[in-house]
Image: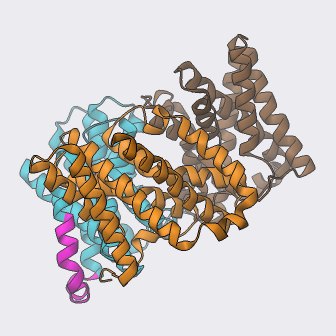
Chain colours: A cyan, B brown, C orange
Amino acid sequence: MSSLLHVIEVIGVFVFASSGLVEARRKKMDLVGVFTVAFITAFGGGTVRDILLDRRPLFWIENYEYPTLIFLFCLLVSPFFRQLRQVVTEKVIVYADALGLGLFSVGGASLAFEMKMPLFVCVMMGVITGIFGGVLRDMICNEIPMVFRRGQLYATCAFLGCWTYLAMALLQFTELPAVLAGIAMTVVLRLLAVRFDWKLPG
Amino acid sequence: MSSLLHVIEVIGVFVFASSGLVEARRKKMDLVGVFTVAFITAFGGGTVRDILLDRRPLFWIENYEYPTLIFLFCLLVSPFFRQLRQVVTEKVIVYADALGLGLFSVGGASLAFEMKMPLFVCVMMGVITGIFGGVLRDMICNEIPMVFRRGQLYATCAFLGCWTYLAMALLQFTELPAVLAGIAMTVVLRLLAVRFDWKLPG
Amino acid sequence: MSSLLHVIEVIGVFVFASSGLVEARRKKMDLVGVFTVAFITAFGGGTVRDILLDRRPLFWIENYEYPTLIFLFCLLVSPFFRQLRQVVTEKVIVYADALGLGLFSVGGASLAFEMKMPLFVCVMMGVITGIFGGVLRDMICNEIPMVFRRGQLYATCAFLGCWTYLAMALLQFTELPAVLAGIAMTVVLRLLAVRFDWKLPG
């Protein structure tokens, strides 16, 4: 079960990195820009969380194979960018991104909960972990961050997913079902929001 | 007297949060964006200072009722945004913001001074605490930060206010009169700058 | 020899500060903006590195005469900005900037290597130290960071310079020749890239 979570995490990292890669290519950046933006999209949220909570080493320094993999990934994928965009359709990206959002957010909330942070802070750390990679990506690419613009629910799904996890953790469920319920809540809400075009009021 | 300072601090937090809220609404962000930008405007300066000085827990984690209050504030205020803008005139905002600037800056300088930082670093920490919430707000909203553009003196008032505080602290005044003098200097300079349109050379 | 490195470091700080100053003036910022952007360009890369590695005090707090010097520099230079731009030609800036890039990058990599970070992380810290001042400068000035846009090799030179340093350090060379080789590699590559218009594929 733990190795399942690990697989999801790797998927999450690559999905987020890919979204950075796509955005960087759209802005006509070169390979350095592509790698940096991919890296920051994948690890930015967790890094901001770790800095705010003062956790060291940062998780991409502890698992330093990740940045290396992302670097190779950018090197390998860049020449085949056009072909790739035809295989990896918009729909695949939405699914994978929802999964990444769920895992990163609930993972961040669980980590803050272990550190005995106040509940609202746990939720904030979860949401920050889930969305700040994308926020930094958009700030570097000189855009108003996508998650703050009026679109289909995104951060709100992570917010409710984190509360789901916390509620179950407080009700003395063990870690695994609580985490899975939080992730499921985030992912399902996000996919429903895309499917039925749910938006927050402006 | 200390409870007076606490009241001013709460006012400062809400004033800065409101300025974030206004800016986020202007950019047509949704509720998530409004909360995030309000939050970052209110706590961004102090957070950057605490990270630079390696102080933990961050002050909004220690006083975690603040983010919760800001969250509720955004939820409650957003539907009545238009009416609110008529009651809270531009003039009220300028006064309140000057007060917030004074308190945040001198508070930041005093904190660095307690940590025995070099004087110029104390002043920088003060100015960072006072202005970086607004800088981050403008960066997220995809604007060149307001305080760096040629306008009526703003950071300069904080700069001189912090030196006032430090001068008095070095002259062996006790903390309270030194802090109050620093805040007063900042606020008065800022209001005079707005009144008489004082600007720095370009 | 160590005092030679110190001289180069001071040159690096002022070169990077000047590039911030030029950019801030171009955006019509006032003195506060000019100082802040100059400061962030000069110290931003090292600060991000130190925060990621959790090193304190930050190097500009330890050597607090630097920010004071930059402050005085901005005060003195601003009135003579136009004359200065004629003496300090584009060519001088390119040379000086290449030197700064080499020193900052290899210095950052060497620092991470001393902390026994994994090799790829050492290189990343080196590149971050070298380029992030400019990245933050461009983000504040509301531009897509120059180093990410398709231009003549820049971060790539730092990347290869850091690997040169690491290779020599791993081959048991002493610190000084390894550092100098890394700096030389970065600077020469950068100047060749400018001279022959070398670019990365988009």
Which residue corresponds to the image point at 33% horizontal and 43% vertical from the top-left? C1
Identified at 58% across, 54% down, the residue is C38
Answer with left or right where residue B66 lies relative to residue A152: right
Which of these two is toward me, B186 or A49? B186
- The quadrant the C terminus of chain A occupies is bottom right
User: Is A126 in front, or is C144?
Assistant: C144
**Toward the viewer: B17 or B109?**
B109
Q: How many discs appear?
A: 0
Name the magenta segment's main secondary structure. Answer: helix
Query: Is residue A78 highlighted in magenta?
Result: yes
Check the image and report above or below for A104 versus B191: below
Q: Position of residue B136 (x, y in %)?
A: 56, 52
Residue at image coords 80%, 56%: B201
Please, which residue is most extreme toward the right here?
B196
Residue C144 in the image: state x and y as whole percent. Answer: 49, 71
Asked whether the viewer can see residue A130, the reply is no
In-front residue for pair A170/A28: A28
Residue C148 on image: x %, y %: 40, 71
- Does residue A186 appear to the left or right of B147 in the view shown? left
Residue C188 in view of the camera: yes
**Residue B69, magenta (yes or no):** no
Looking at the rendering, the stretch of residues picked out in magenta corresponds to A70-89
Residue C45: x %, y % from top left: 42, 51
